[in-house]
């Protein structure tokens, strides 16, 4: 691979990810039950629920992942909180009839689940693309949201393309050869010390992703970032916390909202679930909802 493509795939690691061990067809840990609800546009949204409590932790998966991506978090937190995870439209067991997979529509998926379950005190946790989705959901859920946790999505080194031309140039390789481009990208998402089995499983999973969903969601993620990211970060500055990767153990938090997990790549919650869960515990304490 030439240096230009290598840089592209490494940069891609900063905004997108998947984790096959937590993907469709695998056990959902301690999930008490699953259900479905219609989103605002009629798309059928699948979700899982475990645990009980006044506070609901709603886990929003990243680009092309499903709700079981968060299995280790469901197992850890469900003895103290109500834990909810969902498949965004076009992902997992949810419907995939949309023509555009926008962050706003994904946010409506989260809202539909929250309303169906009558959640009143919510912490939204979103990995990668799930971070913007969590913010669009929070804009509709209002005071029901007591906090938002971005996982390797905000305040990372990645510089998002801003113009339509830049966005199209970034997405075009995925349009031309979705499987090949995505496979190479996925391999670049992991640090050298990552479990080879995890890398192989993730690559295999990505090769089965619907290109229509993947390309549209990637384009719309960039479009949201160019148009709405700065305003959303300002709007939720007091509610937002971040758990980010520090693969080389050399990073410094950009600001006080950021917790760095050393020795992991983009898949923070999967590569080191214990460290991630402990970091999230600390954030929940900061939000005043620790149990």
Image (tube, rainbow, N blue to C red):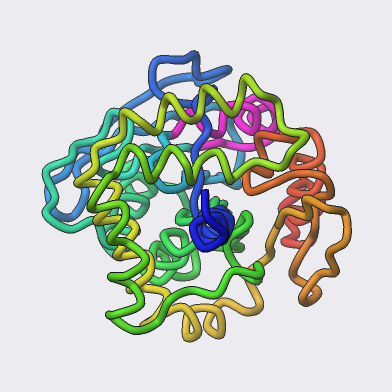
Mark yes or no: residue 62 visible: yes
Give the overall secondary structure of the magenta segment: helix
Q: Residue at x 52, y 55 (%)?
A: 2
Q: Residue at x 56, y 34 (%)?
A: 70
Mark yes or no: residue 121 visible: no
* Residue 102 picture location, percent across and down: 27, 62
Residue 73 is covered by the magenta coloring: yes
Q: Nearer the viewer, residue 5 or 84?
A: 5
Q: Residue at x 19, y 46 (%)?
A: 212
Answer with the quarter of the image where residue 183 lies.
top left
As drawn, 29 above or below 37 = above
Quarter holding the C terminus is top right
As drawn, 254 above or below 111 = below
Q: Is residue 87 left or right of residue 184?
A: left
* Residue 49 picture location, percent across and down: 47, 30
Q: Residue at x 28, y 80 (%)?
A: 164
* Residue 84 picture location, percent across and down: 49, 37
Answer with the quarter of the image where residue 113 lies.
top left
Magenta stretch, residue numbers: 67-84
Q: How many marks?
A: 0
* Residue 207 picture location, percent across and down: 35, 30
Residue 193 is covered by the magenta coloring: no
């Amino acid at each position: 691979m030439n240096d230009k493509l290598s840089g592209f795939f490494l940069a891609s690691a900063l905004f997108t990810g998947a984790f096959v061990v937590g993907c469709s067809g695998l056990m959902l840990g301690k999930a008490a039950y699953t259900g479905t609800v219609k989103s605002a546009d009629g798309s059928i949204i699948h979700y899982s629920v475990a645990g009980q409590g006044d506070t609901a932790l709603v886990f929003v998966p990243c680009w092309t992942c499903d709700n079981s991506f968060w299995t280790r978090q469901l197992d850890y937190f469900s003895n103290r909180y109500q834990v909810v995870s969902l498949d965004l439209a076009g992902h997992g067991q949810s419907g995939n009839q949309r023509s555009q997979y926008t962050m706003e529509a994904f946010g409506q998926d989260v809202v539909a689940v929250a309303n169906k379950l009558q959640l009143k005190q919510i912490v939204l946790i979103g990995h990668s693309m799930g971070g913007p989705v969590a913010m669009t959901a929070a804009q509709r859920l209002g005071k029901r949201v007591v906090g938002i946790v971005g996982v390797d999505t905000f305040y990372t080194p990645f510089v998002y393309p801003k113009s339509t031309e830049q966005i199209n140039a970034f997405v075009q390789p995925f349009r031309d050869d979705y499987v090949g481009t995505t496979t190479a990208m996925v391999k670049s998402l992991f640090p050298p010390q990552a479990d080879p089995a995890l890398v192989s499983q993730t690559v295999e999973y990505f090769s089965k992703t619907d290109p229509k969903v993947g390309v549209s969601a990637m384009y719309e993620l960039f479009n949201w970032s160019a148009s709405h990211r700065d305003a959303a970060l300002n709007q939720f500055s007091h509610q937002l916390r971040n758990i980010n990767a520090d693969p080389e153990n050399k990073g410094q938090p950009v600001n006080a909202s950021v917790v760095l997990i050393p020795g992991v790549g983009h898949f923070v919650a999967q590569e080191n679930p214990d460290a991630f869960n402990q970091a999230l515990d600390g954030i929940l304490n900061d939000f005043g909802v620790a149990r």
